[in-house]
């Protein structure tokens, strides 16, 4: 039987997505704020950001952990493009970069309409090569996760970077603070977490869903509400279930937005990603630590 302290079953369907005998493993502890995990299957390694410590860390499947990049320009979210190159959001430089095979850094975006971006937070790449990222103000609110500064952008948007022309388009801007984002398995929909709060604390903790229409996001809707914490980063599995951070838990939602269950995590969860050779292992960044747990679901993200 699944451990009641590890799993919360909210819908019987959740039982088929988890491994009852699986344990939550702590792979590393010692971060100030861990975020932005990205899996490299070709190297059997996980990279992630320790934002306030200005570093990126690397866990290899032999169990070793080392510093991958320091200083990291307060890097936050990462992904890989279809060529396997690392794409990173940096708070400190307020830009999105690509790390080339030789290790050199290419700046992909640092301004929109002549004004600096706020602080790119999280990023995904579509199969057509377009790069989509969120641009909330978290990285310029204080000197803890970046450099305190007034925003130049009027809005907090999701941007799309064209893979051919390099043109940047504000694809949607109806957010308090856009944060994590991920495509549906068929890439026809984009899910976006709005983690923003408002002065009277009435802002809903929800994940939005959009139709992807060319360079734009249309038909804005609410996919799910969280009953604990606020959503930051999330991923989908091959069946369209959405696994998200929220408080001290990973929440799993069915494609229709029904909460299926939760995995309890000892610390506040920021992001997660599927990894491992079968892509059936959840790697979870949670405040000071990185955790991992095997599930029966398989992550949809590529490569
Ligand atoms: Mg984030």
Image (cartoon, helix red, strand yellow):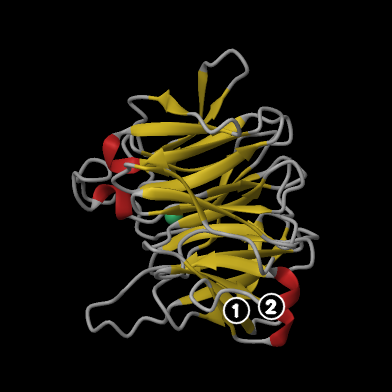
Is residue 179 shown left or right of residue 200?
Answer: right
Query: Is 206 placed above or below 231 here?
Result: below
| Picture quadrant of ligand 1 | bottom left
Mark 2 lies on a secondary structure that is helix
Which quarter of the image is occupied by the N terminus? Answer: bottom right
Choose between 195 and 289: the one closer to the eye.
289
Q: Report if the CB atoms under discs 2 and 1 are less than 8 Å apart.
A: yes
Q: Residue at x 41, y 71 (%)?
A: 230
Q: Residue at x 52, y 45 (%)?
A: 37
Query: Is 282 placed above or below 37 here?
Result: below
Is residue 156 shown left or right of residue 78?
Answer: left
Q: CA distance from mark 2 to mark 1?
A: 6 Å
Instruction: Give the image location of residue 195, x and y in percent.
Output: 40, 68
Q: Which residue is mark 1?
A: 261
Instruction: Give the image location of residue 148, x and y in percent.
Output: 19, 45
Which quarter of the image is occupied by the C terminus? Answer: top right
């Amino acid at each position: 039987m699944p451990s009641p302290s590890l799993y919360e079953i909210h819908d019987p369907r959740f039982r088929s997505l988890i491994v009852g005998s699986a344990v939550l493993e702590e792979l590393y502890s010692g971060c100030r704020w861990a975020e932005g995990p990205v899996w490299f299957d070709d190297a059997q390694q996980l990279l992630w950001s320790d934002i306030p410590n200005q570093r990126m860390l690397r866990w290899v499947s032999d169990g070793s952990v080392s510093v991958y990049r320091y200083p990291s320009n307060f890097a936050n979210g990462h992904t890989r493009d279809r060529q396997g190159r690392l794409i990173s959001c940096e708070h400190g430089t307020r830009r999105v970069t690509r790390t080339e095979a030789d290790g050199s850094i290419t700046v992909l975006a640092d301004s929109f309409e002549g004004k600096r971006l706020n602080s790119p937070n999280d990023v995904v790449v579509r199969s057509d090569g377009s790069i989509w990222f969120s641009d909330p103000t978290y990285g310029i609110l204080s000197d803890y996760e970046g450099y305190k500064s007034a925003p130049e952008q009027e809005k907090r948007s999701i941007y799309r970077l064209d893979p051919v022309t390099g043109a940047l388009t504000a694809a949607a801007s109806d957010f308090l603070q856009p944060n994590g984002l991920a495509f549906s398995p068929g890439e026809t929909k984009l899910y976006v977490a709005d983690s923003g709060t408002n002065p009277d604390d009435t802002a809903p903790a929800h994940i939005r869903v959009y139709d992807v229409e060319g360079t734009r996001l249309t038909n804005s809707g609410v996919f799910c509400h969280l009953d604990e914490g606020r959503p930051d980063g999330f991923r989908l599995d091959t069946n369209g279930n959405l696994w998200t951070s929220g408080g001290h838990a990973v929440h799993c939602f069915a494609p229709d937005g029904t909460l299926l269950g939760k995995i309890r995590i000892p610390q506040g969860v920021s992001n997660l990603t599927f990894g491992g050779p079968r892509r059936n292992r959840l790697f979870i960044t949670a405040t000071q630590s990185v955790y991992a747990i095997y599930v029966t679901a398989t992550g949809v993200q590529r490569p």
